Image (spheres, grey):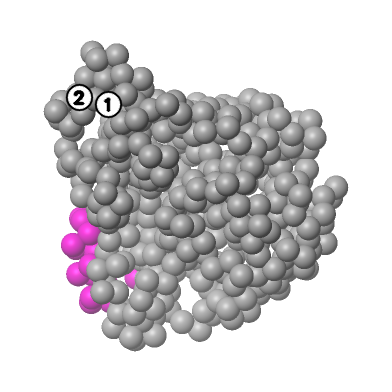
Amino acid sequence: MEEAKYVHIIGIGGIGTSAVAKWWKDQGATVSGSDMHPSQIIDDLEKHEIKTKIGHFADNVPTDCDLIIYSKAVPDTNVERQIAVERGITELSYPEFLGELAKTKKTIAVSGTNGKSTTTAMVAKILIDAGLDPTVILGSKMVELTDGNLRVGAGDWFVVEACEHMASMLNIVPDIAVVTNIEEDHLDFYKDIDDIRETFAKWIASAKQFVVLNLKDEQSEKLEAKNLRKFDIEKRTSGRGEQSFTVKSPGTSANGAEVKLKIPGEFNAMNSAAAATAAALAGVDSNMIAKALGNFKGIWRRFENVGKWKETDVYSDYAHHPTAIEGTLKAFKEFFPERRLVICFEPHQHSRTHELFDEFVESFDLADVLILSEVYRVTGRTEEEFEGSKELAEAIERRGKIDTVKYAKDLKAAEDELRDLVEPEDIVVIMGAGPIDNLARKLAG
């Protein structure tokens, strides 16, 4: 892999695959790629002199290409992957590439249903501030990373997010494996919660040094591992603009660290405790851990304030699982208890919406106004259509917890509803894992 001179990336517009493209560019390789849709990520790659094509075509694959990396959303029937097979070009999926890179470094990998990106970013922040000069690949963006979602360091450590979708994390054999939590999700791939937990058990069994698990998580408590360290928080208080807590991490230098965090939510306090535990196992002392977390500014699309619109604050948030939604709304209410909370949500995948329908119905109770745009269909994933956002809106309205619930057939209709319903001093949260983020940035200019 390290000898590749011309790398072509199929699905290059993903937040992870785009980081890989920039990593190869840093290594001196010529890099090209293709994706189905233009985006800000594609625009950013062009600034790095990485040529991208919109659409998948046979002639996108360069004649002198010697390595193909593809997003897991790209099937083997894709014409560019077929060309790779015909020409005998080495192929790696994005998770397989991460696994190969992990072999060259000491690796901290973070997985779990919720909180992966934030926890990975927190670990990266701590190690950077501690002078360990890590290499980082993140499924989001943060200001501390040289290229937003990538940092190429000269140190021994590699910090990476290990996605559980399609058991992708099994490709990465980490020195330190971190699991934030385990819940039902991706049920288009997994059979049930037992199947999910057993897959995580297989992954943590591969860890070379330590396994870090959530002391409060029901499914994680069922796991066993050698060199196990558990994390929790205590003495948590929260007010406007800050929360404080003590890290509970028995057997590590992070135990007892007093943290003041500038981003809200008990779930982010737990993410901090996970990151603190992993960083301590990497050799960072508790004072540096607390200082770095105190200066952590958050990441792209996680409680991100993107600007002002109609005398309101507009936020973009990636939450798309019921537990994440519930925790995020609670966090907004903690920080802004007197302001009306307007949520515009785009469900992500019909299968997730169907399998977790009842949980979604209950997850929005803290909203004052809720607008549901139609379910986003992920490119490259074939799935049966079940209940849509209209049925979800009707079920939430019947629950009777929210003042105003509206269904929007698409993002344009959702924008129209927002223009009618938003009042000065509201908190507007544009929420979901799909392109709804573009709406947030459009409203905020």
Q: Report the magenta residues as a range.
A: 403-421
The picture quadrant where one finds residue 226 is top right
**The N terminus appears in which quarter of the rendering?**
top left
Q: Which residue is mark 1?
A: 65
Would residue 183 be visible to someone looking at this image?
A: no
Q: Position of residue 69 (x, y in %)?
A: 35, 30
Residue closest to the eye, 89 or 39:
89
Q: Which mark is residue 413?
A: none
Q: Residue at x 70, y 51 (%)?
A: 279
Q: Which residue is mark 2?
A: 63
Q: Residues within 10 Å of mark 1 (few under 14, many from 20)?
A: some
Relative placement, left or right, of 125 versus 349 is right
Q: Amino acid at mark 1?
A: Cys
Marks 1 and 2 sit apart, C-alpha to C-alpha, by 6 Å
Secondary structure of the residue carrying tag 2 is loop
Q: Quick check: 207 above or below 157?
A: above
Asked if labels 2 and 1 touch by Cβ distance under 8 angstroms, the answer is: yes
